[in-house]
Image: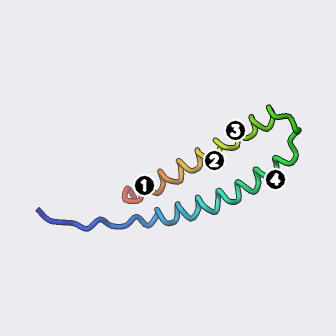
Amino acid sequence: MSASKAQPNPRALIAVAVLLVGLAVYTAVVVTLADYLPGHWAVEAIYALIMGLIWVWPAIALFRWAANWRAQ
């Protein structure tokens, strides 16, 4: 039985960096746009729910890309 060293994933560092920068930019945009919403609590709650979930799909795609680095 041969012991093989696990190779580090070079895409993981890129994915984390892109995610951190992307979330910072996304947060700034979302907070800026929230200033233009009507002051009603229901509008703010729906906005927070939608904007709080939208970032998940690009993050999933980013980490799928990072996880498949050996496939190429």
Residue 32 — which label?
Answer: 4
Q: Secondary structure at mark 4?
A: helix
| Front-lying residue, 27 or 14 | 27
Residue at the image position 79 percent from the left and 31 percent from the top: 42
Q: Are marks 3 and 2 in contact (CB under 8 Å)?
A: no
Give the CA distance from mark 3 to mark 1.
27 Å
For marks 3 and 1 on the same chain, the one whose residue lies earlier in the sequence: 3
Please identify the residue farthest to the top as the structure is shown.
42
Give the labeled residue for mark 3: 50
Would you call the spot at circle 3 few (<14 residues within 10 Å), some (14-19), or many (20 or more)? Answer: few
Q: Note whether 3 is above or below 66 in the view shown.
A: below
For marks 1 and 4 on the same chain, the one whose residue lies earlier in the sequence: 4
Q: Secondary structure at mark 2?
A: loop
Q: Note whether 45 is above or below 65 in the view shown.
A: above
Q: Secondary structure at mark 3?
A: helix
Q: Nearer the viewer, mark 3 or mark 1?
A: 3
Residue flagged by tag 4: what amino acid is it? Answer: Thr
Q: Secondary structure at mark 1?
A: helix
Would you call the spot at circle 4 few (<14 residues within 10 Å), some (14-19), or many (20 or more)? Answer: few
Which quadrant is home to the C terminus? bottom left
Q: Nearer the viewer, mark 1 or mark 2?
A: 2
For marks 4 and 3 on the same chain, the one whose residue lies earlier in the sequence: 4
Give the labeled residue for mark 1: 67
Q: Are marks 1 and 2 in contact (CB under 8 Å)?
A: no
Give the labeled residue for mark 2: 55
For marks 2 and 4 on the same chain, the one whose residue lies earlier in the sequence: 4
Give the CA distance from mark 4 to mark 3.
15 Å
Residue at the image position 88 percent from the left and 46 percent from the top: 36
